Amino acid sequence: MLRKLGYVVLTTVILFGVVVLGYLAPYFSRIETEPAQLVVNDVTQLNPVVVARVFNAETESGLIQQLVSSQGNVSIGGGRFSQGGQTAAANSLHIDMRSYNKVLSFDQQSKQITVQAGIRWRDLQAYIDSYNLSVKIMQSYADFTVGGSLSVNAHGRYVGEGPIINSVLAIRVLLANGDVLTATPEQNSELYYAAIGGYGGVGIILEATLQLTDNSRVQRVTTEMRLTDYRQYFNQQVRNNPQIVFHNAVLYPPSYQDLTAVSWVTTTMMPTVESRLHKPGTAYWWQPALTDFVADFAFAKWIRQHWLDPILYSRNAVHWRNYEASYDVMELEPYSREKHTYGLREYFVPVTAVTDFATDLANILQRSDANILNVSIRHALPDAGSILAWAPEEVFAFVVYYRQGTDKLAQQHTDLWSQQLIDAVLQHGGSYYLPYQLSATPEQFAKAYPRAPEFFRLKQRYDPLNRFSSQFWQKYQPNQNNSAGTL
């Protein structure tokens, strides 16, 4: 009997090992390929756009000369992590900002830094870490450029913060006529509030002065609960707790009834990892393989919730704040996006509607049979005043991570459930985030961003020939002035 049981166990282990190796094998031989130079795409690989020329910005004078000596539409790109053509327009002059990446000034005492917009957050973090300083607000991954994050008015898991605009002291913006203006909340304020969160519509953000904060050690603390208990828990334990730096709640599909609240609390304990920052160029293999596994099987989602995450969260983890803010998006990158790809959607609701919207979200996603891997609930304080504000009031954000097919039918299916979620969030007085696929109808965009007419009036002032363009603006900007033509 024991021998037979041993055979069963051995066979199970071997089969499990074969499955695991099957998922991991492609990642050990991953070959990175560069797209054709004149095709601009985004991380999903769903939006290839043929542009007329690509200009790699390196100096301000060279960039101005290129802009004023050219004709036609201009598109602007950084890390290209937006997922709906926000960085490209067909036949445009595409400005690639990634080489425009210097630190221009730094004041350790006032904790302020001025950088060129093409610098990646990871490089900025490397510069300030030795001074034991940290970025005040940014998204969860450090591969993005600063200018790109400002253009989408990004946010992260920071408690007591909100959109990135709340930490931006000043920007310099290149206008379509070649003029460069400094914009702050007091000087050229309309340009400041239009350019941040403006998706490159009014000009090119050249520089940004950011308020920094202290680096610190943080320890992970987790609590499991029902969704219905989360708002009270957040208000009592998280919202006004100055010791909590990062927080989000993991809402588990497919039931969307249970969650794990994850907080990173300041501590004096020694870090459990040696590095102060994630090392760039790390070869990730098990993380994307695990993502593929969870996406492939319904039972794998159960395993993730009831086995993998409890094991992960049972480990005592103490990191530096900069380590927790310097993750590489490659840890999520699949071996191939040929047949399937991964994307994000995000929905913002007033804090009083968090439970009701979550119920609607669950019903829509279950009914549509969408392949959802994760829903992360985050909190944000109100926006400082950007015109296309996604948080005009205090909100909870629902970040939906999913897998879809790359064929036309799969795209139509994704568009359908996305539009249904937008309708639901609008009914609760909320909004949706703009950096993702362009599933929303123009009518939904207008309802979610009621100050859009004000933005378009400013765009007409600063860019009267509508030179700054993209697939995003071509869909949502009404009555476009197409006199810019093509190159």
Image (cartoon, rainbow, N blue to C red):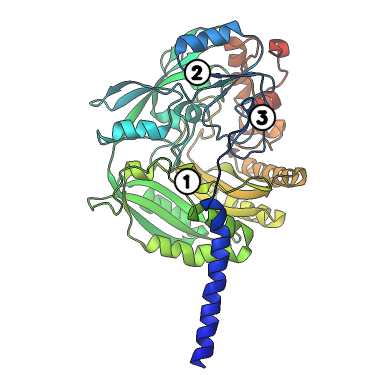
The image position of residue 236, as x and y in percent, is: 38, 53
Earlier sequence position, callout 1 versus callout 3:
1
Earlier sequence position, callout 2 versus callout 3:
2
Q: Name the residue furthest right.
A: 409
| 136 shown above or below 112 | below
Measure the C-alpha gap from mark 1 to mark 3.
Answer: 24 Å
Q: Name the residue nearer the viewer: 303 or 251.
A: 303
How busy is the neighbourhood of tag 3: few (under 14 within 10 Å), some, or many (20 plus)?
some
Residue at 25% of width from left, 50% of height from top? Answer: 267
The amino acid sitting under disc 3 is: Ala
Residue at 42% of width from left, 52% of height from top? Answer: 234
Disc 2 marks which residue? 57
Mark in front: 2 vs 3 = 2
* Residue 446 disc label: 3
Q: Does any portion of residue 256 appear in the rendered image? A: no
The amino acid sitting under disc 1 is: Arg
How busy is the neighbourhood of tag 1: few (under 14 within 10 Å), some, or many (20 plus)?
many
The amino acid sitting under disc 2 is: Ala
How busy is the neighbourhood of tag 2: few (under 14 within 10 Å), some, or many (20 plus)?
many
The image position of residue 325, as x and y in percent, is: 39, 42
- Asked if disc 2 and disc 1 are in contact, CB closer than 8 Å, the reply is no
| 224 shown above or below 265 | below
Earlier sequence position, callout 2 versus callout 1:
2
| 155 shown above or below 112 | below
The image position of residue 98, as x and y in percent, is: 48, 25
Mark in front: 2 vs 1 = 2
The image position of residue 392, as x and y in percent, is: 51, 32
- Left or right, 399 with respect to 484, comes to left
> Residue 82 lies in what quarter of the image?
top right
* Residue 378 disc label: 1
Residue at 61% of width from left, 60% of height from top? Answer: 254
